[in-house]
Amino acid sequence: MLRIGIIAGESSGDNLGAGLMRAIRERVPDVQFEGVAGPAMIAAGCKPLAYAEDLAVMGITEVLVHLPRLLRLRRRLTRYFLQQHPDIFIGIDAPDFNLSLETRLHRAGIRTVHYVSPSIWAWRSRRVFKLGKATDLVLTLLPFEISLYEKHGFPAKFVGHPLADQVPQILDRAALRKTLHLPSDGQLVALLPGSRRTEVERLGPVFLETAQWLVAAAPELKFVIPATTPALNKLIKSQVRMLKPDLPVILVEGHAREVMGAVDVALIASGTATLEAMLWRCPMVVAYRIAAGSYALVKGLGLLRIKHVALPNLLANREVVPEFLQYRALPFDMGTAVLGLLQDQAARTAQLETFATLSSNLCCRADERAAEAVLELLPNDPAAAG
């Protein structure tokens, strides 16, 4: 019987893990999974040793607060997997947590895979050597990442992005609005301040200020905010009630992707959501803020190595979508950029045409390709034997 250890952090890793698990199970029906999982992975059959939300901590100074707890959890999981010795171990994203664990398991003779390349092209580029020593294979979601491993002789495989395989080929925006109980006419702007509490606390108020600026400039506008969890929905409701109670805003619990498909423009926190918006053909403006202490460290140490942070811009190697980072994330500037995409058809078309090209490069049956790559690491491929 094939036994696989697997650890995912936060909701995006949980979704990636669930897709990979289903694709492996199609090839090896009696496979067993256990590790750190979220709701999607648990539904796909993973025995949870801990929960993905326990790893969902971002930033430098923010991590320090949770460091003792995270170190205890990693030690516990390391001991467990060394004792149980699974046939293969898969760490999904969360590199600061997973890489040390993968190194210990790899040294003990357990085959290890890291799924989702860390952003070594952006900062901490020397992590490529740690990955090379810690893993038998790195699975990348973005095509430009492969060369970073190949030039050092480390095995890596581009599998595509599962999100690209999930988006409908034809989007019916009117039907999506009806399903989500959104206004059928008029222009809608989505506000997506992030999927973590710290992000929403930091970006929610300035996004609401931006919406207020937009209403003053274009009174007919309406807004929709999708919250990824009930807890975030409660937090956003509180922010709206306290800061902008008269704002024409609709809150939706979940369904962030469908919201992207239903609206005219989105103001989005940098991260996986920018890729989702690109795939759902949603024109966007991107913003991000981190804690002041984290930002000072990143700037002071010269850790950031890239001109852009939004994934569409990284894929295109140029600014396709406007970015407003840290102290540049101001209501007037972001509002002006959003208004431009609402009123300038040429600007909308330019974004959407680039989105179509970039999306086609990511549509590769990612779950299946990732499953095949994982099973090929085993000395006797159980899928072939079965």
Image (cartoon, rainbow, N blue to C red):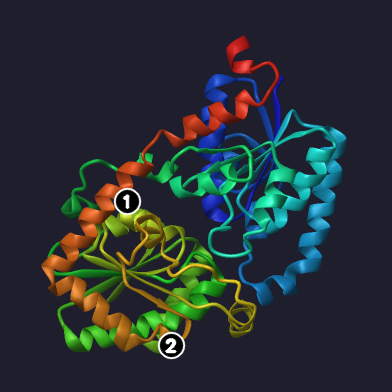
- Disc on res. 87: none
Q: Residue at x 65, y 52 (%)?
A: 128
Residue 86 image point, x, y percent: 77, 31
State left or right for residue 300 relative to residue 347: right
Residue 353 seen anywhere in this rendered image of the structure? yes
Residue 270 drawn at (x, y percent):
44, 67
Q: Earlier in the sequence, mark 2 or mark 1?
A: 2
Of all residues, the one furthest to the top in this rendering is: 385
Q: Which mark is on residue 279?
A: 1
Disc 1 residue type (three-letter): Leu
Instruction: Point out which mark residue 242 bears.
Output: 2
**Which quarter of the figure has residue 333?**
bottom left
Considering depth in this image, is 49 or 183 the residue closer to the camera? 49
Foreground label between 2 and 1 = 1
Residue sitting nearer the eye, 313 or 274: 313
- Secondary structure type for disc 2: helix
> What amino acid is labelled 2 in the image?
Met
Q: CA distance from mark 2 to mark 1?
A: 34 Å
